[in-house]
Amino acid sequence: MFDVAVIGGSFAGLTAALQLGRASRSAVVIDAGAPRNRTSPAAHGVAGWDGVAPSEILARFRADLEAYPTIGLKSGKAVALCGAAEAFTIETDGGDMITARRIILAHGVRDVLPEIPGLAEAWGIRALHCPYCHGYEVKGERLAVLATHPMSAHQALMLRADWSERVTIIVNRMEGLDLEALRAADIVVDTRALIAARADDSGISLSLEGGMDEHFDALFLGPKVSLAGSPADQLGCAVAEGPMGPFVRVGPMAQTSVPGVFAAGDVARPMPNINFALADGAMAGSGCHASLLFPGFVMPLELAA
């Protein structure tokens, strides 16, 4: 039996494992090998790794863990979980059965993009989600925002304020946006629907309702997120609803509503960011370790809180 099973081997999960390894606790990281930012050519705003590909950073993280003999990495997806603190059982899609005293959920969330042809192929390259992560690289260029939820107006205003004077919002039949406020901020409002997208080295071409194409250097949008199929469902972890979708609720030391189950990274916060994932992983790893040393010290999140 492992002390901890970490489900998810990206930024949060590997950071949590590092804390446990340095405490000489046994842990296994179960990783499906599909990090959320796998299509992005570079991570930005991460101190020491600004502009480095996420895959390269993660490879360095895995190499760091090789120095800790109590930490193991296992490829696969956790498909079934049961049990309680001190005796959890995890089954992987490869048929492995793993037992652990604690669980850290760090598997992230699934982005749900609008079903628009070409958008998935451009995702992370010319179709982007975060001005902080990607805005500087397209600063001053012609940018579009695809309205997918009420926060899209907020995204367009942010880009117009500090990244570019040439911002267009594609309303795409979205209701409830304050179009006059957007126009007052010198944002171009295009009320047509987006039919298709095509990205290349020069930017992204958007085919709009009525048969016209518009070319931009980048398209920003905020996708909905899903926890469908998450181990959090099987374990009964309480969730909250964020502006983009659900996330697992955690307490100050990253424990969920289920004793012995911790969560870190995108799965446990409404705003995703690599820096936040690193901090969350460190908190989950140290909080989990504290719970092994002092049972009852790390109290589970109260459902009514």
Image (spheres, grey):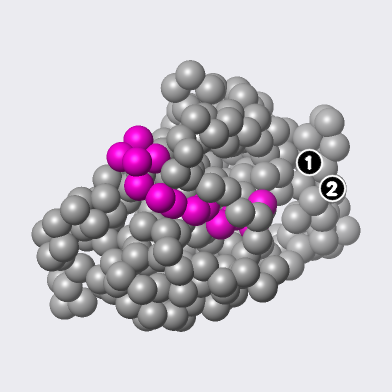
Q: Secondary structure at mark 2?
A: strand
Q: Disc 1, disc 2: CB below 8 Å?
A: yes
Residue 86 drawn at (x, y percent): 30, 70
Identify the residue under disc 2.
Answer: 198
Q: How many marks?
A: 2
Q: Is residue 110 visible?
A: yes
Q: CA distance from mark 1 to mark 2?
A: 6 Å
Which part of the image, by quadrant, shows the C terminus? bottom left
At x 62%, y 25%, the residue is: 52
| Left/right of residue 36 with respect to residue 281 in the rendered view | right
Residue reaching furthest to the top: 48
Instruction: Return the disc, 1 or 2, that comes first in the chain's sequence.
Output: 2
- Residue 135 is drawn in which quadrant? top right
Query: Would you call the spot at circle 2 few (<14 residues within 10 Å), some (14-19), or many (20 or more)?
Result: some
**2 in magenta:** no
| Left/right of residue 97 with respect to residue 292 in the rendered view | right
Viewer-closest of 8 and 144: 8
Q: Secondary structure at mark 1?
A: strand
Q: Mark 2 belongs to which amino acid?
A: Arg
Q: Which mark is residue 42?
A: none
Residue 220 drawn at (x, y percent): 61, 45
Residue 260 drawn at (x, y percent): 29, 67
Q: Which mark is residue 204?
A: 1
Q: Mark 1 belongs to which amino acid?
A: Ile
**Over which residues does the magenta segment extend?**
21-33
Q: Say above or below: 237 vs 37.
A: below
